[in-house]
Amino acid sequence: MPVKIRLARRGRKKNAMYDVVVADSRAPRDGRFIEKIGTYNPNTDPATINLDGDKAFDWVMKGAQPTDTVRAMLSYQGIMMKKHLQVGVNKGAITQEQADKKLEAWMKDKESKIQGKVDTLAKAKADKRKAALEAEKKVSDARAEELKKRAQEAEAALVEEIKEGGAEGDEDLAEDAAEVEEAQAAEATEAPKEEAKAEVPVEEKKEEPKAEVKEEAPAEEKKEEPKAEVKEEAPAEEKKEEPEAEAKEDKKEG
């Protein structure tokens, strides 16, 4: 059965990530696999590669054929170099110790190159950011200078207009100031009048109960006058009774 070491897509749309798997060459790309030996993320710079070196080396020694992309990854991780040295040891061309030393020296050199690339990328990114900031600063400075120039031009134009206006401009300004002062004085005089008008009804309402109390005294006196008239009518009744007494006396005499 032909076995391959290849990539199986596991990422989402427009953000692909891959698993490094050992699978039958006849199986679909994202189908069944024998074993997963690592992951690969091409979205970073440099790309992120996580491999189980021992398993990958074991499958390579057993005859599993990596795809072109996976072969580049194995070379990047030093697995293909390790296979080459191990084949030499198996053939007796070199000893195991020599193979280990060569592999260690190669790995150090590779790590230094990788680190150099990382540093170069970081420096380029920092330089790009610095250049962008400087360009932005230049644009803002130019804009500020232009605004300052426009303000100076506007100020100069205003001064010229004032000079051309001469006395007419001064008279207009004096008239405007006089109108403002008159309006303020009118408002100041109208405000106390309005306050006085508002206070008058309050005083009248307070005095009304006092007037009613004073008028009640004469009312009582008027009520007492009829009693005096009733008392005076008593003599009238006596007068009416006197003729009746005289009549009775006349009858007796007759």
Image (cartoon, rainbow, N blue to C red):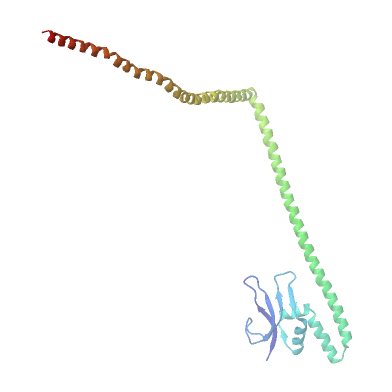
Name the residue rendered at 72%, 46% in the picture. Answer: 142
Q: Residue at x 75, y 89 (%)?
A: 62
Q: Position of residue 164 (x, y in %)?
A: 65, 26
Task: Assign the C terminus to one quadrant of the image.
Answer: top left
Q: Position of residue 231 (x, y in %)?
A: 30, 15
Say if 242 sits above or below 31 in the image: above
- Is residue 233 in sight in this rendering? no
Asked if 141 appears above or below 15 in the picture, the reply is: above
Please tell me in which quadrant of the rendered image residue 244 appears. Answer: top left
- Left or right of 141 in this view: 181: left
Is 45 in front, or is 186? Answer: 186
Question: Residue 195: x percent and y percent?
Answer: 53, 26
Left or right: residue 38 versus residue 114 is: left
- Compared to 188, does 246 lie above or below? above
Residue displayed at 81% across by 82% down: 81
Q: Is residue 161 above or below residue 128?
A: above
Name which residue lies at 74% across and 81% down: 71
Within the image, what quadrant is residue 242 found in? top left
Tell me the quarter of the image containing the N terminus: bottom right
Q: Is residue 168 left or right of residue 226?
A: right
In the image, taking residue 18 as reference, residue 76 lies left or right, namely right
